[in-house]
Amino acid sequence: MKTIGLIGGLSWESTVTYYRVINEYVQRELGGLHSAQILLDSVDLADFENYQRNGYWEYAGQQVGLAAQKLQAAGADMVLICSDTLHKVADQVQEMIDIPLIHIAKVTAQACVDADVHAVGLLGTRYTMDDPTFKSYFVRRAVDVIVPHGDDRAFINDAIYQELCQGVVSKETKLALLDIIDSLEVRGAQAIVLGCTELDLIVEPADTILPVLDSAALHATAAARLALAGD
């Protein structure tokens, strides 16, 4: 079994999802008392939120890269950044290590192709929704990306940082998110991408008739599958 390196704490709530999904996959595949071999470097989200808000992306990339280097030195065979937003610096991080970085957007976009989905509604932080970096992985695979309108993007971003990243899940926010999902369906979305690793805390597949593609769960599953490949 290969060792999975997680860069977590971005937020810690979503890092729990990664740990759970990876271990559930390994236990299903191997049975018995088996669990995954995982290394975790948990960073401080407050620092990275400051880097993002002030546009210090290169410095953020350096810090994520240092975390990846620590995981590689400790014996990780692959690295995952447990955050959709920080995949904006994924290429910079990959250049700093010699082991593969499993890219969350690549994994999620491929899931769209596998499901024969050609247009998705994307929910995430404003950085993910506004910036072309994340969306480009879908476009390359002929998947159209529909993002919420401006006010809705601001609402989702605030909900992520002011509520979900702090462990707050409110009924009012959930209902508002479901209204936004409905509006994306009207605009042509065939599925919804939860493009923030905290959004699965509040949006569940049963909440909408559209298929829900949870980027965190897909990312974690891809890593678990790779960890067992050849075993």
Image (tube, rainbow, N blue to C red):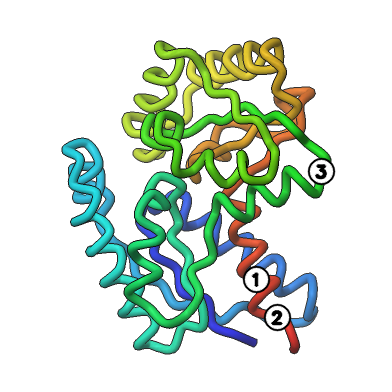
Q: What mark, if any, has residue 99 been given in the picture?
A: none
| Residue 228 numbered mark, or none | 2
CB-based contact (under 8 Å), mark 1 and mark 2: yes
Question: What residue is disc 3 on?
Answer: 115
**Could you tell me which secondary element the residue under label 1 belongs to?**
helix
Secondary structure beneath dot 3 equals loop
Tell me residue 113's x, y (percent): 76, 46
Q: Relative to 190, is 171 on the left or the right?
A: left
Q: CA–CA distance between discs 3 and 2? A: 23 Å
User: Separation of disc 1 and disc 3 at Cα?
Assistant: 20 Å
Q: Is residue 78 above or below residue 53?
A: below
Q: Quadrant of residue 18?
A: bottom right
Q: Is any part of residue 36 visible from this angle?
A: yes
Q: For mark 1, does the 10 Å Cα neighbourhood hold few (<14), some (14 to 19), or many (20 or more) residues?
A: many
Q: What's the amino acid at mark 3?
A: Ala
Q: In the image shown, does 45 or 166 lie closer to the viewer? A: 45
Residue 171 appears in view:
no
Label drawn at residue 224: 1
